[in-house]
Image (tube, rainbow, N blue to C red):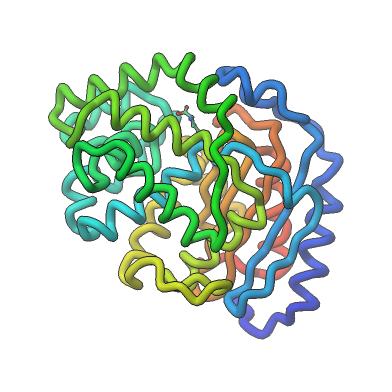
Amino acid sequence: MNKTITVAQIRQAAQEAFDESRNLKGGANADYIPYLANIDSNLFGLSITLLDGQVINIGDTDYKFGIESISKVPTAILAMQQHGTATVLKMIGADATGLPFNSIFAILLENDHPSTPLVNAGAITACSMITPKGDSDAKWKAIVDNITKLCGSAPQLIDELYKSESDTNFNNRAIAWLLKNYNRIYDDVPMSLDLYTRQCSLGVTTSQLSVMAATIANNGCNPLTGDKVFDPDITPKVTSLIATVGFYEHTGDWLYTSGLPAKSGVGGGVLGVLPGIMGIAAFAPPLDSAGNSVKAQAAIKSFANKLGLGIF
Ligand code: DON
């Protein structure tokens, strides 16, 4: 990787990648969660946070959208911080499923593990592991405080999204109870599912997510606040999870073409981590068939390729 790139080159590449991607057609808003179907499809933002704390924002970077599956990343970090990386591997796993994010088949195939904290099954299990056990309010506070520290500012619950998801999350209810059958939910089942649903309904901006990504890239130290949010040994573990399953069944294609560990959410967000270099986030609601934002992928990929940032 070329490590001599200047901030001016980063700004220029980001602006070019944004301009190239802004008029891309294709994809559609997630429609299985009614709230998401009605978000303005033209919103588009790209943010980059460098490890010296500089933040580059282009487009709709102040718009708060549903974090959705990107929330699986901070809660995996919190589970590792509370229990250690080896315990998370033992209690959840780290395998890519190669299947859609909400796959029940994946649980049946690998009934010894929910596979990885970055698919729905493993994320519900991760919520069940957060301490203090049995105390929904305290667990929720731990989840939100962790996201706040990673971003350097607080996320905001989108009540309408939370209600919309809670009213329609029948597949996730099936996943949670199936995991219980395999002794892979380590707290109350409805509580664990509710925490997962609520964390998915948090509103964040691309600017906040890029700071979260930079904190991961910076071995757990938030480059804006200087806060040591998690232990440095977690960065390679969580980045490997992001790299192996961040785009679900499209992860291989993504990694092959971008070279960048990144995680998507059906709210239209994508978070990318370049360890030791920077954090990137983009947002645009229309998604491809695997639930990944079309424009956010295009912008991040183009940006990374222009500067030769791929990690391989
Ligand atoms: O559980 C769900 O289906 C949603 N709350 C989150 C799914 C998601 O974001 C998948 N990512 N691309």
Residue 285 at x, y percent in the picture: 69, 34
Is residue 210 visible in the rendered image? The answer is: yes
Closest to the observer: 89 or 51? 51
Horizontal side of residue 288 vs 40, given as left or right: left
Closest to the observer: 16 or 253? 16
Residue 32 at x, y percent in the picture: 56, 18
> Which residue lies at the image location 37% right of the left edge and 22% below the top edge?
172
Horizontal side of residue 153 vs 15, given as left or right: left
Residue 247 at x, y percent in the picture: 51, 42
Horizontal side of residue 18 vs 70, given as left or right: right
Corner quadrant of residue 108: top left
Task: Please tell me whether residue 278 is drawn above or below residue 82 in the rendered image.
Answer: below
Corner quadrant of residue 129: top left
Q: How many marks?
A: 0
For the N terminus, give its image quadrant: bottom right
Is residue 243 visible in the rendered image? The answer is: no
Horizontal side of residue 300 vs 312, given as left or right: right
Closest to the observer: 286 or 244? 286
> Which residue lies at the image location 46% right of the left edge and 44% below the top edge?
71
Task: Please tell me whether residue 122 is drawn above or below residue 172 in the rendered image.
Answer: below
Corner quadrant of residue 239: bottom left
> Which residue lies at the image location 21% right of the left edge and 29% below the top edge?
188
> Which residue lies at the image location 42% right of the left edge and 69% below the top edge?
220
Residue 22 at x, y percent in the picture: 83, 45
Closest to the observer: 128 or 272? 128
